[in-house]
Amino acid sequence: MERGDTERIEITISSRFENIELVQVIAEHLCENAGVDEDGSHWIGMAVREAVANAIKHGNKLDVRKKVNATFELQGYELEITISDEGQGFDPEKVSDPLNPQNLMKTSGRGIFYMKTFMDQVSYTFNTSGGTSLVMTKNLAKGNGIASTKA
Amino acid sequence: MKATNRTVDNVEIIALQGKITIGSGDTQLREVISNAVSAGKTNVLLDLSGVTTIDSSGIGELVGSYTTVTNRGGKLKLLHLPAKLNELLHVTQLITVFEVYDNEREAVASF
């Protein structure tokens, strides 16, 4: 696969933690095949891991009958990743800032922060029929945050 | 995740190997620390050189471990941080919480 190609991959998993790595590996391989270095691919894979974990735990509440869908769309250097669950949604405004000194020693609440650190953009869509879709984008042609990519 | 314990100069050195991720090593780490503290071992040095993968749940368990040990009047310090774990602690500013060492002898002497 040459950089700049178009690629679309989709996978649907049941809400089990052991399935997280399946989706993470797809993200990392897609990035490596697109020419992203090992570190850059790792950080994008970690953002995907956090998104899928949230979808399973907070979205689908560990209900294995509920599915998590992941789509990866690469157009040129633009990677768009969508992670969808069948949960009730949440208020992004109520997500606490893990860098706030009051929250520093909390044992949870860093997943979304890591996603935002490793990706260019993170947004949510709350579907009227239920379920939440998390959309993350990354330009693979530039280094961003601590996720470095080959120029 | 696999944990191997040994004691050096009243410091419990716990070497962790493998993944510390949601639904896997995170709960195991909690048990390992709980068992050490229950056994009266409150000077804890976590050797993380063998950790291959960690996520936000694993990071959260490291924080929880620190709190558990500190609340018992002990200290928890980190040894041999893998580069990516180091990055994760830096971006969340948790690196300011933990004492981190690259040398075991120096780490043990610091307790």
Image: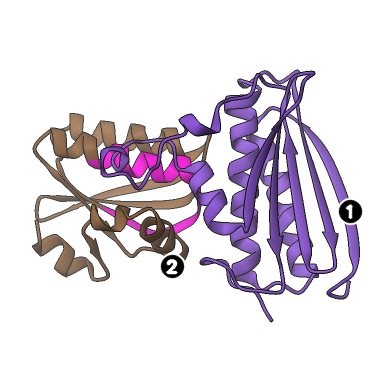
Chain colours: A purple, B brown
Indicate the quadrant containing the N terminus of chain A: top left, top right, bottom left or bottom right: bottom right
Q: Is residue A84 visible?
A: yes
Q: Amino acid at mark 2?
A: Ala
In the picture provided, is A118 more to the left or to the right than A106?
Answer: right
Residue wearing tag 1: A8
Q: Residue at coordinates 38% horizontally, 43% vertically from top-left?
A: A98
Which label sits on residue B83? 2
Describe residue B109's horizontal placement relative to residue A124 as left or right. left
Image: magenta residue range: B46-66
How far apart are the alpha carbons under marks 1 and 2? 32 Å
Identity of the residue drawn at 73% across and 55% down: A27
Reply yes or no: does residue B57 show up in magenta: yes
Nearest the eye: A123 or B7: A123
The x, y position of residue A147, in whole percent, is 57, 66
Q: Is residue A112 above or below residue A61?
A: below
In which quadrant of the rendered view does residue B63 lie? top left
Who is closer to the viewer here, A74 or A21? A74
Task: Indicate the position of residue A83 as horizontal and vertical percent values.
Answer: 72, 39
Q: Chain of mark 1?
A: A
Task: Say which amino acid is labelled 1.
Answer: Arg
> Given the image, what chain letter belongs to the residue carrying mark 2?
B
